[in-house]
Image (cartoon, rainbow, N blue to C red):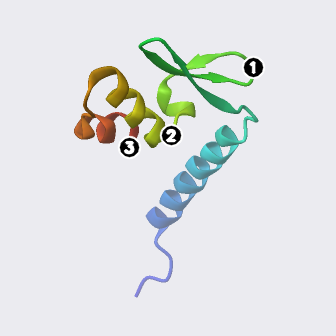
């Protein structure tokens, strides 16, 4: 009977490193806001950097934008592009 499997220890170290990186990245302190300009929807950070709509716009904001501008919402694209 094995009490300690060394491959599980390596997997756990990789998992902990990835989780730590994710937590640190999410703690960057930047806030994102949703911006609509004409037929464009995007996000802007608190430091002024532009980004994709998915960073600062809610799923509902993206749905409403698509409905207003295109007359329909592509739910499949919304799910694949933004996880909505």
Mark before the other along the chain sequence, 1 or 2: 1
Q: Nearer the viewer, mark 1 or mark 2?
A: 2
Is residue 41 toward the left or the right of residue 44 in the image?
left
Marks 3,1: beta carbons within 8 A: no
Q: Mark 2 Cα within 10 Å, few/some/many (few <14, many 20+)?
A: some
Q: Quadrant of the C terminus?
A: top left
Q: On the image, which quarter does residue 47 sit in? A: top right
The CA distance from mark 2 to mark 3 is 10 Å
Identify the residue at image location x=38%, y=36%: 63
Q: Quadrant of the N terminus?
A: bottom left
Is residue 72 toward the left or the right of residue 26 in the image?
left
Q: Which mark is residue 58?
A: 2
Q: Nearer the viewer, mark 2 or mark 3?
A: 2
Single out the residue that lies furthest toward the top. Answer: 38
Q: Indicate whether 5 appears above or below 22.
A: below
Q: Mark 1 Cα within 10 Å, few/some/many (few <14, many 20+)?
A: few
Q: Which mark is residue 83?
A: 3
Mark before the other along the chain sequence, 3 or 1: 1
The CA distance from mark 3 to mark 1 is 25 Å
Q: Indicate whether 31 appears above or below 37.
A: below
Identify the residue at image location x=34%, y=33%: 81
Mark before the other along the chain sequence, 2 or 3: 2
Element type where label 3 sits in the image: loop
How many numbered marks, from 0 up?
Answer: 3
Q: Position of residue 66 (x, y in %)?
A: 35, 28
Q: On the image, which quarter does residue 49 sit in? A: top right
Is residue 68 toward the left or the right of residue 20 in the image?
left
Q: Position of residue 58 (x, y in %)?
A: 50, 40
Element type where label 1 sits in the image: loop
The CA distance from mark 1 to mark 2 is 20 Å
Pointer 1 residue: 47
Q: Position of residue 53 (x, y in %)?
A: 49, 27
């Amino acid at each position: 009977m094995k009490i300690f499997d060394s491959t599980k220890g390596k997997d756990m170290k990789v998992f902990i490193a990835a989780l730590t990186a994710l937590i640190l990245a999410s703690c960057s302190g930047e806030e994102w806001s949703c911006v609509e300009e004409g037929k464009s929807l995007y996000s802007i950070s608190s430091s002024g950097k532009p980004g994709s709509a998915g960073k600062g716009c809610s799923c509902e904001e993206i749905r409403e934008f698509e409905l207003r501008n295109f007359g329909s919402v592509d739910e499949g694209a919304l799910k694949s592009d933004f996880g909505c």
